Image: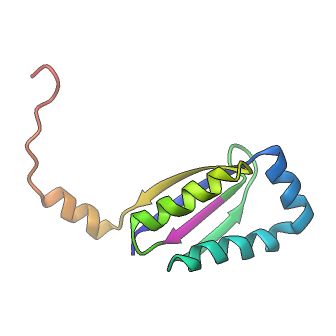
Amino acid sequence: MPKFLIQSTYTTEGTKGLLSEGASGRRAAVEQIVTGLGGKVEAMYFAFGEDDLVLIVDFPDPVAMAAVSLNVKASGAVHTRATPLLTLDEIDEAARRQVSFRAPGK
């Protein structure tokens, strides 16, 4: 299953919701949306600084990740960034593939 790193920042309203329901309430909400699309939450950490929440999730396909991203962002309570994560074997496979590329100006 494709794996993604999700970095999130709460808006003021999102932070108020977090204060109201606590971290365990947010964990339950995240689990529900991820498992509802056939995914799995591998790790979930709260942080402070640029990001408020960091997750590693598995989804059956990138479209499931996009569906979650669209719905979460539409709430207006959270700003998110999703980064696809690749295994070492996947990078080795990518390195073996022949790609014809011409650099700009060459």
- The residue lying at 68 percent from left, 49 percent from top is 51
Residue 31 placement (x, y as % from top left): 65, 76
Residue placed furthest toward the top: 105
Residue 85 placement (x, y as % from top left): 42, 61
Task: Say whether residue 75 is left or right of residue 101.
Answer: right
Q: Quadrant of the C terminus?
A: top left
Q: Is residue 1 shown above or below 90?
A: below
Query: What is the span of residues highlighted in magenta in the rendered image?
Result: 54-58
Task: Say which quarter of the image contains residue 11.
Answer: top right
- The residue lying at 50 percent from left, 80 percent from top is 38
Task: Say whether residue 46 is left or right of residue 104.
Answer: right
Whether residue 6 is visible = no
Task: Say whether residue 68 is left or right of residue 52.
Answer: left
Color encoding of the figure: rainbow
- The residue lying at 74 percent from left, 51 percent from top is 77
Q: Quadrant of the N terminus?
A: bottom left
Q: Is residue 72 shown above or below 49?
A: below
The secondary structure that dominates the magenta segment is strand
Per the image, is 57 magenta? yes
Of 80 and 102, which appears nearest the observer?
Answer: 80
Task: Say which quarter of the image contains residue 55.
Answer: bottom right
- The residue lying at 88 percent from left, 67 percent from top is 21
Tally the marks. Answer: 0
Of 25 and 63, which appears nearest the observer?
Answer: 63
Per the image, is 16 magenta? no
